[in-house]
Image (cartoon, helix red, strand yellow):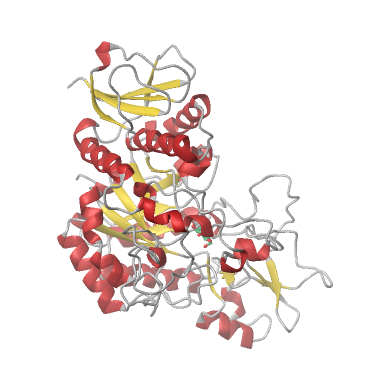
Amino acid sequence: MRQWWRDAVIYQVYLRSFADSTGDGIGDLGGLRRKLRHLVDLGVDGLWLNPCYPSPQHDHGYDVADYRDIEPAYGNLDEHARLLDEAHDAGLRVLMDLVPNHCSTDHPWFQAALKAAPGSPERERFLFREGNGDLPPNSWKSSFGGPAWTRVPDGQWYLNLFDSSQADFNWRNPEVAEMFDDVVRFWFDRGIDGFRIDVPDSMIKQKDFRDHDGSRRVNPYTHGQPELHDIYRRWRRIAESYDQTRELSFVGEIWTGDMDHLAASLTDDELHQAFYFDLLLQPWDATDVRRSLENANGVLRAGRSLAWVLNNHDVWRTPSRYGGGELGLRRAHAAALLMLALPGTAYVYQGEELGLPEVVDLPDQARQDPRWIRSGGTDLGRDGCRVPLPWTPDPPTFGFSTAKSSWLPQPDWFGAYAAAGNPTLRIYRAALAARRTVFPAGGEIAFLETGRDDVLAFRRGNAVSVTVFGGDAYELPAEWGSVVAASAEVTGAVPAATTVWLSAA
Ligand code: NOJ
């Protein structure tokens, strides 16, 4: 079986900011349906929809109030069915976002827990604990800043590893696992092709709620607990109970530096794939990038499948991360081709194909990310990579909406990145088309000797990818083949901040 998910290119749709069809300044399913052609022309194999379930939107959908419906501002289940049909007709797979670690405090289960007494079965679905006097039960911190505990009127505290509007489930309670079995089946029955899973690594917490001294970046008591494997196996069994030709798949959002742990979650009876985030943490430096890829190679060698990613709705966009301006954009193009040459699936985040930089100067009053709010404005948060897309050069919303403004304000210069005639888009389209024929599926990354610290080259099959990070132009060895794709114009030697693909076939 081909296992499409092993070497696909998936386009990440942050629906709220993709395209608005109703004129309220908020993206929706109708807007996505109208623009599906953009994805087809780009040449991707599928799309991943960020959470689009009913939600009070404190964390823009990662606070789910109902797992089996569509947020009214985005459409409804019929509209979702139409999207699925049209995407499938266009040859695109559709992944939904499964958010099992926590739900919105508006979710009926949490509302029932609030009304019920300490120790009740309703509270047992979440992680309610007594505090230490007036202090929270332990020292765990929220990823968004501040304590991971919120107090309720009767004095108990509930755990929230993210915003206090997102209550962590108690995954040691079988009712929780059963509820998610149903949710997974609900969407598989409706015809989706798989799930991206939100922070799966945190679903199980260490039993005694031991204090975390804060000395390590990742709290070991809220990540990577052994019982997680039971949950992965349970979901895999559900996926495999469907018609095998559908090849339903799960990709886990697992932020970890522990490659053995990552590999252990990707066995044949657990998750199909996980994101490899280490690459997006690297600066524009050949040595750092090589080290990161070498680190991933062990997982690939063991036959596990990785999903590569440089941009998503949680991180600064690549052109800004790599220094900003023309040079930052040029490096982002080079990084994109490097990523697209790697063995595995690649994720492209909406706007990445337009070369959008981070919007760093959003007005304070416009910012909405709970990270901004909970940090008292010391952490700018993630709004800058979530600004609605520019489709045309025309203000006020650049083709995003017929409204006068969009839910997050677009800067005046956004029109310069509009889709029509966009140079980054041309590079992405050409690279995606070439990728299919140039590189074989799977395998590992075989590094080639370049004689330089600032030039990174690797072979896959008959093809070679070469990235010149900095320094002088690099003369390509003739035996590597001829250039079949490039992130910038190359006439002879490869200039700095450029990736080329060569094929000897
Ligand atoms: C990871 C998601 O990508 C992020 O956007 C969200 O805030 C957290 N998980 C919490 O759900």
Q: Relative to 34, is 457 on the left or the right? A: right
Q: Quadrant of residue 92?
A: bottom left
Q: Quadrant of residue 76?
A: bottom left
**View extreme (bottom): residue:** 115
Residue 432 higher or lower than 149, as above or below: above
Q: Position of residue 427 (x, y in %)?
A: 29, 39
> Residue at the location (33% across, 37% down)?
340
Task: Let me know if residue 269 appears in the view.
Answer: no
> Residue at the location (41% across, 35% down)?
330
Q: Position of residue 363 (x, y in %)?
A: 58, 63
The number of callouts visible is 0
Q: Quadrant of the C terminus?
A: top left
Residue 290 higher or lower than 61, as above or below: above
Task: Let me know if residue 36 appears in the view.
Answer: yes
Residue 398 higher or lower than 339, as above or below: below
Q: Position of residue 272 (x, y in %)?
A: 36, 49
* In-front residue for pair 324/256: 324
Q: Relative to 464, is 163 on the left or the right? A: right
Q: Quadrant of the N terminus?
A: top left
Q: Position of residue 109 (x, y in %)?
A: 53, 81
* In-front residue for pair 342/252: 342
